[in-house]
Structures are given as C-alpha cells and as structure tokens.
Image: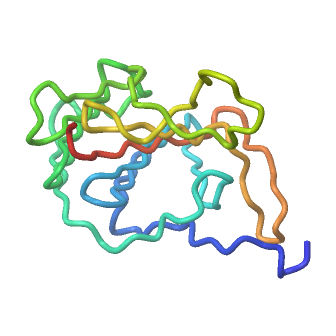
Amino acid sequence: MQKIYRIKTSPCAGQENMIIGNQYRITVLTEGLVRLEYNADGEFEDRATQMVLYRDFPEVDYRVIHTENGIEINTSRLHLVYDEKEFSSGGLSIHVKGSVNSTWHYGEQICDLGGTARTLDGVDGEIRLDHGVVSRNGFSLLDDSNSHVLLEDGWIKSRKKGEGSLFLGIWSRL
C-alpha cells in the first residue's frame, strides 16, 4: 500500500507500564485505563489494530503487590485483583476507587449507555446502538479481540485464534 494511505500508529506501550507473567500481560495505560491480555502460549500482540492505534502513553504511577493468591495493582483510580491464571470471574476483578458498588468481574456484561449510529439516513423511529464508552457504573469495556492487526505496509491481517485484549476504562460515575 502506498505510504500516503497508511494510518499512523504508535502501538507499543512502554515496558515501565507493563506487568508481565508467563501467560498474561497487564498494561497500565493511564491511572484509569488498563489493557488485559491472556494467552496460553505467552505471546502478545504489539501491533496496532483496527480499533486501537495508540498505546504509547507516558509512565503511569501505579503499585504492584504480590500476594499468595496473585497480584494486586493500584492506581489513584482503580484496584485490580488477579490470580495470575486464565481470566475468570473469580480470578480477575477491578474496583473503581471512590465509587460504591462499582466493581467489574471478568466476563461480566457492562450495561453501558449505548454508542453512536454511523448514519441516520433512512431511519424512521428507533435504532439499536452498539456498545458505548460511558456507563452508570463508572467504567467501560472495549474488547479488541475481533479487530484485525494493522501491518507496517498498511494492510490488515486476522489475529491468531485465542489472541486478543480487553481495555477497561474507569470514568466518573454518573
């Protein structure tokens, strides 16, 4: 693909923001945004995807505590608890600091306020909206597992089966 048509990206997060285990990688992108990856082979995707072009954020102030049950990650906005095993509802949770009853457990559906419609052409009445990035619980989930990888030459490529990542963002509670 000609250079003029290629999308500019900065997909590699700084090592200082990563917590890496044998089969997982957690990247603290901001004090309120984390990327969660699990892969049984221990291989992780660093290229940009159709959904996420930039992961190169400044160094984040966070603390990791190793416990007998796994790890805990604390920032000013979230408290993540992870058992360092395959992601499960009992093994991975993130609590929004300062919000009562705002805890997300892996696999839990987030009831967000809806996203946007691409166009309203030909619409007469209600339309179904895709997922959005705002919820009443103070957090939102972006599943990047089904988006294609952007190659350096500008083309796209499907991911390997089982690859993918989740981004959990902490916002203000409405």
Position in image of residue 124 (x %, y %): 69, 24
In the picture provided, is 5 more to the left or to the right than 7?
Answer: right
User: Based on the displayed image, in which of its 4 quarters is residue 19 positioned?
Assistant: bottom left
Q: Between residues 5 and 119, which one lies in front from this camera angle?
A: 119
In the picture provided, is 128 more to the left or to the right than 93?
Answer: right
Position in image of residue 150 (x %, y %): 74, 59
Q: Between residues 81 and 33, which one lies in front from this camera angle?
A: 33
Residue at the bottom extreme of this rendering: 4
Image quadrant in which the C terminus is located = top left
Q: Is residue 92 above or below residue 144?
A: above
Q: At 35% across and 19% down in the image, what residue appears?
A: 89
Q: Is residue 128 above or below residue 121?
A: above
User: Based on the displayed image, in which of its 4 quarters is residue 112 positioned?
Assistant: top left
Position in image of residue 28 (x %, y %): 33, 56
Position in image of residue 105 (x %, y %): 31, 24
Q: Is residue 24 above or below residue 48?
A: above
Image quadrant in which the N terminus is located = bottom right
In the picture provided, is 4 more to the left or to the right than 114?
Answer: right
Instruction: Mark yes or no: residue 22 visible.
Output: no
Q: At 39% across and 55% down in the image, what residue appears?
A: 27
Q: At 20% across and 39% down in the image, what residue appears?
A: 173
